[in-house]
Amino acid sequence: MENKSSQRKPVRLQFIIGVVGAIFLISILSVVFLSFQSSTRSREAFLVDSEALATLSNIQRHWLLLHVETRAWLDDPSSGTEQVENQRSLLAAQLRVIKPYIVDNLPASRRITNIEARLTEYDALLAEAQSSDTPQAYKEQLTDLLQNEETEQIKRAYDQVERDFFVTFSENLSAQQNIQRLLIVLAILFTLFIIGAGIWAARTARITAELQQSQVATLEQRVADRTKALSASSEVSRRLSSILDRGQLAVEVVEQLQSTFHYYHAHIYLFDETKENLVMTGGTGEAGRILLERNHKIPRGRGLVGRAADSGKVVLVPDTHADPNWLPNPLLSETQAEVAVPIMVGDQVLGVLDVQNNVANSLGTEDANLLQNIADQTAIALQNIQSTENVKISQEQYALALEGSNDGIWDWDIANNNIYYSARWKAMLGYEEHELTRGFVEWEERIHPDDRDYAVKALEDYLERRAPEYKVEIRLRHKDGTWRWVRDTGKALRNPDGTAYRMAGSHADITEARLQQNLTAQRARQQEALNSISQKIQSTTSIEAALQVAARELGHALGRKPTLITLDPVNEQKSKDSGASHAN
């Protein structure tokens, strides 16, 4: 937590420094922008005022020239008014030029308007003088008009514009100075800020380096612990793979944990058959030995072990004194931290792995994760033990069933073309167990020629799923050369695509049943033949005819062999006498 807090502080300070630096930069840029705008406005004002002053100077000059030319014309009317009109045009042009420059200067604008009005009066007097025979009579009026206007309007307009020019220039100069002072202050503050940020950065770099060193040390410790945990997990997995006894398995797990991580105590509980009690199966130290001798049990749901088994979740108590639900064990009086991890296969809880330490807060999430990994491996080992026991029971039951059925068993690995024949299968055909080792051909070569095509086709049809089952009755050659009737049945295991990869079945010797069946059929045929002969003989009318019928039918029944019947003469005479007396 301290490392995380110390890591957050530099991040917050970096953010603050970044914000302050950004504010400084924005302020400096703003001041520079204002300075640029002020300079631009000052330059524009300077240019406007300069143009205005220059134009007013031209107006004053042209007004003076107009005055001079007017006096010259009045002194000598014969010289004409061409120069006067030229100066008048130039003056009018200058008056038009100055108006845009003094549009914001109302006093100067009014004086220019007055000049234009006086110029209009001048034009009127000049026109009268030109039309007069004595233009010298207008000399005083024109001279006074030009003289007074130059003194009252033009000079004052010039003074007004000049005064405004210097005022504006002074204000702009003052603003520029203020901006420069502000820039100097900001530059000083920014320099101090940079120095402070550099000092802070150096300090932060030192703190960061220390934190990194601390983190590297912590990481190295974690890596070492993790390596140790993986090594322990691998060792446990290696040892568990060959253990087929639950008690030995539990002892091996807790002893490995104890020797590797030096826990105060470790033990394993497994559910009994009722699933209501957790029976201690393995424990470390003297306490573990005593608890095992007492056949120590914990009811489901009681204590950390019972709670872990009931919930199927890890129960961690870093400080047992702070947990009111923790139940102490008198034999483990020094326990101050405990973690109980369920041993599960899927959703089924098989038992609980419980570890205790004698230092408070010495067990944490990393220990729980490590123990969960060990518990998972233990669950797999327990499942393997159960599977081994189930296989052993199945094998025993299968052996008993085979012994009781007296059938021969065959098991065909189709993928590798290997086949197993049981001892009984071989004995049916007169062979010892070490004989008939060539596989499938041993069966195929011993099929009766009349049954071979039928048997092979039946097998192929079943493997290709054209027939729902494989069940045939065929003859196989015995070692002594005789033929044995066999009922051959089998069942195949198939891949998802339907291809058979393994097939197993049995041979039942039905030779006696077949012989009995054949004998019964033969007797039935004989009886049927005798009944037919009797009926035909009874239908005859003489002894000779009866004898002929009997001879013929017996010949047919015996395969058309020649048949001879003889009669005893004495018996024949008696038969005739008897027949005569019966006739009388």
Image: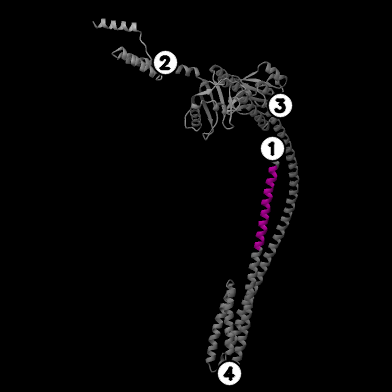
Where is residue 259, by image quadrant?
Answer: top right
In this view, the residue in front, 304 or 1, is: 304
Comes first in the chain, label 3 or label 4: 4
Q: Is residue 462 above or below residue 111?
A: above
Depth check: 555 or 351 in front?
Answer: 555
Residue at the spot of label 2: 523
Residue 1 numbered tag: 1
Per the model, the C-alpha gap separating discs 3 and 4 is 140 Å
What distance separates the C-alpha of mark 4 from that of mark 2? 183 Å
Please name the residue that numbered disc 4 is placed on: 78
Q: What amino acid is labelled 2 in the image?
A: Arg
- Image point (62%, 78%), residue name: 55
Q: Earlier in the sequence, mark 1 or mark 3?
A: 1
Earlier in the chain: of badge 4 and badge 2, it is: 4
The kind of residue on which mark 4 rests is Ser
* Coordinates of residue 564 in the picture (x, y in percent): 38, 14
Q: Disc 4, disc 2: CB below 8 Å? A: no
Q: Is residue 76 left or right of residue 578?
A: right
Residue on which the image places disc 3: 256
Mark 3 and mark 4 residues within 8 Å of each other at the beta carbon: no
What is the spatial separation of the Cα atoms under label 1 and label 3, in whole angstroms? 32 Å
Report the coloring of the rendering: one colour
The region drawn magenta spans 7-34
